Image (cartoon, rainbow, N blue to C red):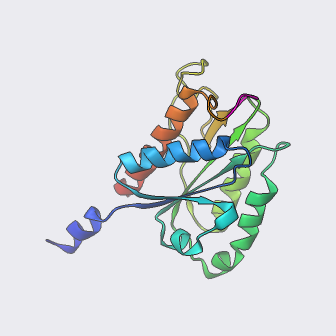
Amino acid sequence: MSVTDLVSSAPVHVCVVYHSPYGHTAKVAQYIAQGAEQAGADVHLISVAAVQWELLDQADIIIIGCPTYMGSLTSALKQFMEDSSKRWLARAWLGKLAAGFTNGGGLSGDKLAVLQQINLFAMQHGMLWAGLPFMPTGRSQQDINRMSSFLGLMTQSDNAGVEVTPPEGDLETARKFGKYLVELKADY
């Protein structure tokens, strides 16, 4: 077996970092993780309440998400970003693949602003950004990328409980996104 074979057979290491006060964003993170696992990745879900910095340092892909609150990140995710400053200074995450996701109650709710903030954070770290590549298939709750987002994953949860929202189309988009990111990393 050659060195190239060993490198290509090594699993891709994925960390999905999230803040989820009510469980909806955690549910989306779990579906992203499912998709990444289906593609053969070693996946770790990491709540910002218990950050595992060593896992993040070893990751090939870091996917970051939180709810959209008042058109912005949650304070807990912002604190995670600020706490990463030693890694920023050391360029510890340089060249890692990065992606973002957000969930909110409204169909818009300024989710794009959250994805832009996560994107800028990844760029500050020298990470490589991967957007959501899926064409919208419609606007029903069963459709893929129903919110027509391309910078990252947007999902929507109304006031119903986490057991019924986000809807199936959003969760399937999340699953496909996780799988896509692992396959993308394997290609480069």
Residue found at x 53% / y 39%: 174
Within the image, what quadrant is residue 85 found in?
bottom right
Q: Position of residue 100 (x, y in %)?
A: 61, 50
Q: Where is residue 65 in the image (x, y as percent from the top left)?
A: 65, 51
Q: In this rendering, is residue 67 above or below 169?
A: below
Residue found at x 68% / y 80%: 86
Taking depth in this image into account, of 50 and 170 the one nearest to the observer is 50
In this picture, residue 134 sits left or right of residue 156: left
Residue found at x 54% / y 22%: 143
Label the magenta part by its dominant secondary structure. Answer: loop
Taking depth in this image into account, of 182 and 129 the one nearest to the observer is 182
Q: In this rendering, is residue 30 above or below 143?
A: below
Within the image, what quadrant is residue 70 found in?
top right
Quadrant of the rendering where the C terminus is positioned: bottom left
Within the image, what quadrant is residue 136 found in?
top right
In this picture, residue 133 sits left or right of residue 139: left
Taking depth in this image into account, of 79 and 114 the one nearest to the observer is 79
Residue found at x 51% / y 42%: 31
Q: Quick check: is 152 in the magenta stretch? A: no
Q: What range is drawn magenta here?
A: 157-161
